[in-house]
Image (spheres, rainbow, N blue to C red):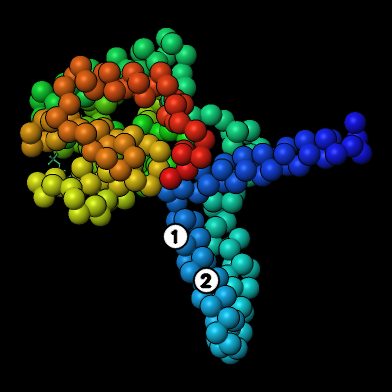
Amino acid sequence: MPGSNTYYSIIALLDIALVTFVLYKIFLLIKGTRAIQLLKGLGILLAVTIISQWAGLYTINWLLQKTIGMVFVALPVVFQPELRRALEQLGRGKIFASSSRQLGPEARKRLLEELVRAISQASQQKIGMLIVLVGESKLHEFTETGTYIDGVVSRELLANIFSPNTPLHDGAVIIDGERVVAAGCLLPLSENREVGRELGTRHRAALGISEVSDAVAIVVSEETGTISVAQEGNLTRYLSEKSLKEMLEVLYSAPENQNRPWWRKVR
Ligand SMILES: Nc1ncnc2c1ncn2[C@@H]1O[C@H](COP(=O)(O)OP(=O)(O)OP(=O)(O)O)[C@@H](O)[C@H]1O
């Protein structure tokens, strides 16, 4: 009943849950974009401002406060493309969309069949491949670096894209749901020093994208034909066709994080 303590407790809980959900969605939206670097910079600036105030460094504190004010004014200008995209997504209701890996049984079966066929064929022929499977973070920052395709995933399309000496074979293909969004995309390279020296930039790019987002990247080595999968900053190497299929089935049957509490989704 409005006015009672229980009523206010329920409203407060609802309020907290809504704020948490909105913050989580914003985090997913900016994860893997340049906004995250800017947030880190702002965090450092805020920390230094607080320290300077605490230490009584009034002039530097005044300067830092003015700088932070200017940064906030500059934010909408610097992030104009990202803000526009976020508002467009909000308008289309896409912000509240779930993971791209949640497909119907028929679509999932077809997608996995086509992916596994294309990858094992490339592995046998030692054709280099780098495929990124989008999760909840949409990776616009990276699809924009490549060539827009928007085609249904098929073994023929993937074989064509990665065919040596063709314009799109360099870089990564980004797959969202059942569609190849773009090809020839540039991904961030992992700086993980524990990665074997024999692994070059293709494997580092796969690891890199899995470190900054919830995407999963599949690599076929041009040198050896081995299949590897990068997920959450870990690289699983020497996969057989069977183990790749099993891995993909798990990935697509249980949307990532399904078995994890929500707070563990945010890394
Ligand atoms: N930042 C990047 N984003 C996407 N793809 C990349 C990136 N850097 C390199 N590549 C791809 O990796 C290829 C070079 O692979 P390289 O031989 O250095 O890697 P590798 O891990 O040893 O793989 P392989 O075993 O296939 O040789 C490039 O031709 C390009 O297609």
Residue position for label 1: 37
Tell me the SS state at disc 1.
helix
Q: Hey, which quadrant is residue 135 in on the image?
A: top left
For the question of whether residue 64 can be seen, the reply is no
Which of the numbered marks, if any, corresponds to residue 258? none
In the image, taking residue 256 as reference, residue 50 lies left or right, namely right
In the image, taking residue 63 as reference, residue 33 lies left or right, namely left
Label 1 or label 2, whichever comes before in sequence order:
1
State whether residue 166 is above or below residue 31: above
Residue position for label 2: 47
Quadrant (top left, top right, bottom left, bottom right) of the N terminus: top right
Q: Residue at x 49, y 56 (%)?
A: 35
Give the amino acid at mark 1.
Answer: Gln
Tell me the SS state at disc 2.
helix
Ligand 1 lies under 8 Å from the Cβ of mark 1: no
State whether residue 254 is above or below residue 168: above
Give the amino acid at mark 2.
Answer: Ala
Quadrant (top left, top right, bottom left, bottom right) of the C terminus: top left
Place of residue 39 in the rendered image (x, y in percent of width and height, measured from the top left): 50, 60
Rate crowding at label 1 as few (under 14), some (14 to 19) or many (20 or more) other CA atoms within 10 Å: few
State whether residue 75 is above or below residue 192: below
